[in-house]
Amino acid sequence: MISYWPYHQAVVRAEGRYIKIFGPGGAVVPAERCAQMDVLLDAGNFTTPRILRQSSQEDVIVFSAIAGQTLNELGREDAAVCDEAFARAWEKWSRAWVAELNGSYGPAAQSVLDSLPLRSPEWEATKMCRRVDDWLRHNENVPELSSQRDALRTAAEQVAMNLLRTAPDPLVWAHGDLYDKQIIVPDGDIPPGLLDFDSTARHEAARDLAGLDVHLELHLRNNRMTPARYLTAHTQVLAAAEELHVSPGRFDAYSDAIWLRLALSPLPGRFSLAIAVLAERAEKELRQ
């Protein structure tokens, strides 16, 4: 079992393939997104899994495996890879990402891009507020969480304001759930692998890059990545953002939004860490 979200989906690794299990009918959109990515990502910047089989009940998809290690695996402190190889892996991803988003699309790929869901800052803020409201409603009768509820409300108001107070960058193709476990680095000249297109959409480029960067900082703060390797990866994310002309303010706004999403995670310690990070960032902004 690779991952499991109750009532939503599970991912199972088998020999030479991965099996993604959904609720009844839940595989329809993910399968459609994979077919669309075959057209949209045809420039060869990334390697993507092939669909080997789909169930007739539209609740299971079997994907081919991509050889190589994820950037997450390469970044672990116990990973048997030298710092130079780690740096080359991140540079390889950065070049591919910039090339993909700066590339031009033919008519078929442009048609796919135009058909993807549009994720505006207003959409992002609305979805975030709904998740916060769900958390508050779920925990409204827990007296010992009173201070956490107040902190969450304050953070949510600040994050929503940051998302909406400046003009958005242009909308581009976005993975929608980009972090280091979704990126595979094969050996040799094979393009990097990219996984899981369930959330792909048209979004600001800042959204994917900020999500990737926040997960790197999360690894650092949880002692799952050395400061040196964090700096290596973080530098490549910022380099990609600069080449893609991502506005620093938009990058920061989406970083805040993703930290807030992490605060809502049920994982132990995640709430206090994420809220503390948001408080640090708010205090830093006031000092500037």
Image (spheres, helix red, strand yellow):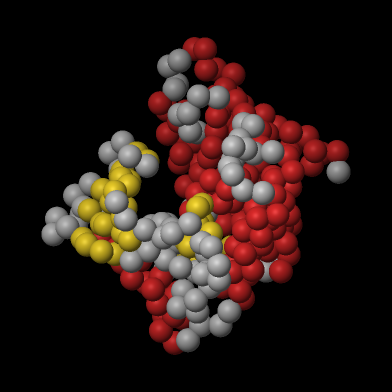
Q: Which residue appears at 45% of the width and 21% of the height? A: 140
Residue at 53% in and 46% down:
73
Instruction: Tell me, yes or no, if residue 161 can be seen here.
Output: no
**257 left or right of 61 in image:** right
**Residue in the picture at 46% in, 68% down:** 47
Q: Position of residue 13 (x, y in %)?
A: 32, 47
Residue 136, horizontal then vertical, whole percent: 47, 28
Residue 264 placed where, x, y %?
50, 33
Q: Is residue 204 left or right of residue 131?
A: right
Residue 88 visible in image? yes
Q: Residue furthest left?
A: 56
Q: Is residue 167 above or below residue 274?
A: below
Outermost residue toward the top? 143
Q: Quadrant of the N terminus?
A: top left
In the image, 173 versus 143, the foreground residue is 173
Position of residue 171 in the picture relative to residue 226 (left or right): left
Q: Nearer the viewer, residue 237 or 1?
A: 1
| Residue depicted at 65% across the width and 53% down the height | 86
Q: Is residue 41 above or below residue 242?
A: below
Outermost residue to the bottom: 107
In the image, taking residue 14 as reference, residue 42 lies left or right, namely right
Pinpoint residue 124: horizontal percent, then vertical percent: 52, 52
Outermost residue toward the right? Answer: 288
Residue 41 versus residue 31 in the image, above or below = below
Residue 249, quarter of the rendered image: bottom right
